[in-house]
Amino acid sequence: ETGVTQTPRHLVMGMTNKKSLKCEQHLGHNAMYWYKQSAKKPLELMFVYNFKEQTENNSVPSRFSPECPNSSHLFLHLHTLQPEDSALYLCASRPARTNTQYFGPGTRLTVL
Amino acid sequence: AQTVTQSQPEMSVQEAETVTLSCTYDTSESNYYLFWYKQPPSRQMILVIRQEAYKQQNATENRFSVNFQKAAKSFSLKISDSQLGDTAMYFCALHNAGNMLTFGGGTRLMVKP
């Protein structure tokens, strides 16, 4: 256990649904990340938040909308997804003044 | 742009033996960090070991050690006395000044009894 939690662990949704993924850490980390892990592809960085401010958007389609209300919580809002968006979505957090990221267990997303 | 390449998609090793996973990288930065992460079937990505590029001494964590060759841009992971619990995907990653990780494609390691 890294102390980074993600809910739900599994999610099945239709292309017209709206859902949200949640990531939470109470480790005092100040940076949080969303990654997408698809089969047979390297992990892809999606978004980076530093002290609640988005510092990176790695050309992610607008159907993915991140939200970071405070430094302990990170959301990924999903709407009108495509089947190719099916993947494992990983959240990570990083303490200040270090560069080690700690990952959550991931949410397995299936888009029908 | 920086890249990380893991040329071995799959490897296997007998329990108690030693195995080495390869990783090469490319970056234009002089100060960076390298990591090996392990992702077992449970999917939780776990940090195995990290190496600061400015340190010549190879990092070691119990049965895990690295061979860091900065000039060759090579960062291999050696697992000694392999255990069944070492079965997992192993990812090499490069951390840059922008606080972002670039991952390799991963190596699936199977430890056989």
Image (cartoon, helix red, strand yellow):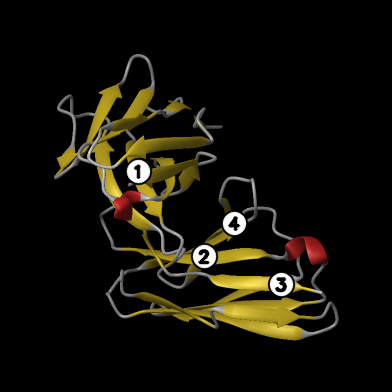
Residue A13 point in image, percent of width and height: 75, 81
Mark 4 secondary-structure assignment = strand
Q: Are marks 4 and 3 on the same chain?
A: yes
Residue B22 point in image, percent of width and height: 40, 28
Chain letter for the residue marked with disc 4 in the picture: A
Identify residue for label 2.
A90
Tags 1 and 4 touching, CB below 8 Å: no
Alpha-carbon span between mark 2 and mark 3: 14 Å
Mark 2 secondary-structure assignment = strand
Locate residue A19: give its quadrant.
bottom right
Q: Amino acid at mark 2?
A: Leu
Q: Nearer the viewer, mark 2 or mark 3?
A: 3
**Residue pushed farthest front?**
B113
Alpha-carbon span between mark 1 and mark 3: 28 Å
Identify residue for label 4.
A37
Mark 1 secondary-structure assignment = strand
Asked whether, in this view, residue A65 is left or right of residue B32, the answer is right
Alpha-carbon span between mark 1 and mark 4: 17 Å
Alpha-carbon span between mark 2 and mark 1: 17 Å
Residue A99 in view, yes or no = no
Alpha-carbon span between mark 4 and mark 3: 12 Å
Whichever of labels 2 and 3 marks the residue nearer the N terminus, that label is 2
Tags 4 and 2 touching, CB below 8 Å: yes
Chain letter for the residue marked with disc 2 in the picture: A
Identify residue for label 3.
A110
| Front residue of this view, candidates B102 and B76 | B76
Residue for point 31% across, 52% down = B84
Asked whether, in this view, residue B54 is left or right of residue A83, the answer is left
